[in-house]
Image (cartoon, coloured by chain):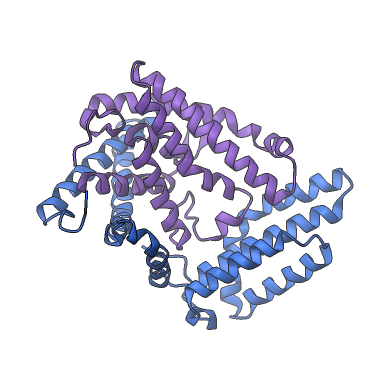
Chain colours: A blue, B purple
Amino acid sequence: MISLTSPIETRAHRWPAGLKLGLLSLVTFGLFFVDSVLFHGVFLVFVTALYALPGRLFFKNGWKHLKILWPFVFIVVAWHLFTDELPLGLTVAFRMISAVGLANLVTMTTRLSDMIDVVHWLTRPLQRLGFNPRILELAIALVIRMTPVLVSKGQSLALAWRARSNRRSGWRIILPFTVLALDDADHVAEALKARGGLTNQERE
Amino acid sequence: MEKNIAYIALFAALVAALGLIPKITLGFGVPITAQGLGIMLCGTILGAKRGALAVLLLLLLVAIGLPLLAGGRGGLGLFFGVTGGFLIGWPVSAYVTGLIVEKWRSGSITLVSFVASIIGGIFVMYLFGIVGMAIVLEKTFFESAALMIAFIPGDIIKAIIAGLLTAAIAKARPASLLSRQVKVTS
């Protein structure tokens, strides 16, 4: 499965993932304490510059991820034009784009393996309470492995439906789809047990 | 234990896959994102704890950068956007839905799942979602709620479908309906 990390190597790819995530939380939290439209405008220019630094392709890819924001930006600005509070509207819109843009930037410059290391580190306090990080890692791997399997089974189901009916399957197809997933879950559980299971690591 | 992990992981994958298969259009042209339905099913089928864990696992993978949400979306940005509150509400939503199905055993599974999906999948989820919107957009709770009203009919339809599907699964795979198992086998 392809992660959303940008293949274009930037300097930020080499920064520690924990540092980037920590900075992101701090900055985003801080953004909510400033109300000046000028500040948010300048900050948005700064975020845009960060996207532009690694080159045009990186900028274009980043832009694509932020497209989901435009309907909301439109609603916010239109709403405040209507209530005659345009500066407030622009503040909200700028802050929203900056916050999502920065978060997306962290996603684009951090490799999946680095992120998983952070998750591992974050769950360390839980390990003292008896939480087994290997179970979480197994679950992560299972989802990554099984999502494409389920997608391809779903596509086969849709094809089988189309071969037999000229009407759309609609929601009805979700039933066999869920049953397939449940059967897969049983098979995976059996397979895990057959390979020694998780019992040698768990405490229950 | 193995069964719990496998079910949690497979349901996380199922919700992801529901977002990647072509969009489902209802008879009268209303497209529904099947992922919201997936969240309801996590609760009604897996029950409170496992349902919430399945959703949390999915969100964890989304947060670390896998494009598992509808339309191939993913990444940290989603949690900071206008609809971030909905994502944060997802696990709670699955938990509440599952809890109702677990506790309310006297009614028919169709009705119970439907009501549980309405309360968990709509009421709880919108509560989180609207609070999130209110914070990001600097609007009052009711102003934000007004923006979301248009989506409620579609979600009521999803709750009806969740009820029907759960009942059908209770018949097709009774052993898999973990929310109604008396004793959880490990």
Q: In which quarter of the image is the C terminus of chain B?
A: top left
Q: Farthest residue in the top direction? A: B107
In this view, the residue in front, A193 or A74, is A193
The residue under the point 50% across, 80% down is A15
The residue under the point 44% across, 46% down is B19
Q: Farthest residue in the right direction? A: A84
The residue under the point 27% across, 26% down is B170
In this view, the residue in front, A35 or A155, is A35
Where residue A189 appears, x then y in whole percent? 19, 47
Q: In which quarter of the image is residue B113?
A: top left
Where residue A164 appears, x then y in whole percent? 29, 32
In this view, the residue in front, A134 or B32, is A134
Where residue A168 appears, x then y in whole percent? 41, 32
Q: Is residue B109 above or below residue A40?
A: above
* Left or right of A117, for residue A45: right
Q: In this view, does B107 lie above or below B21?
A: above
The residue under the point 40% across, 43% down is B52
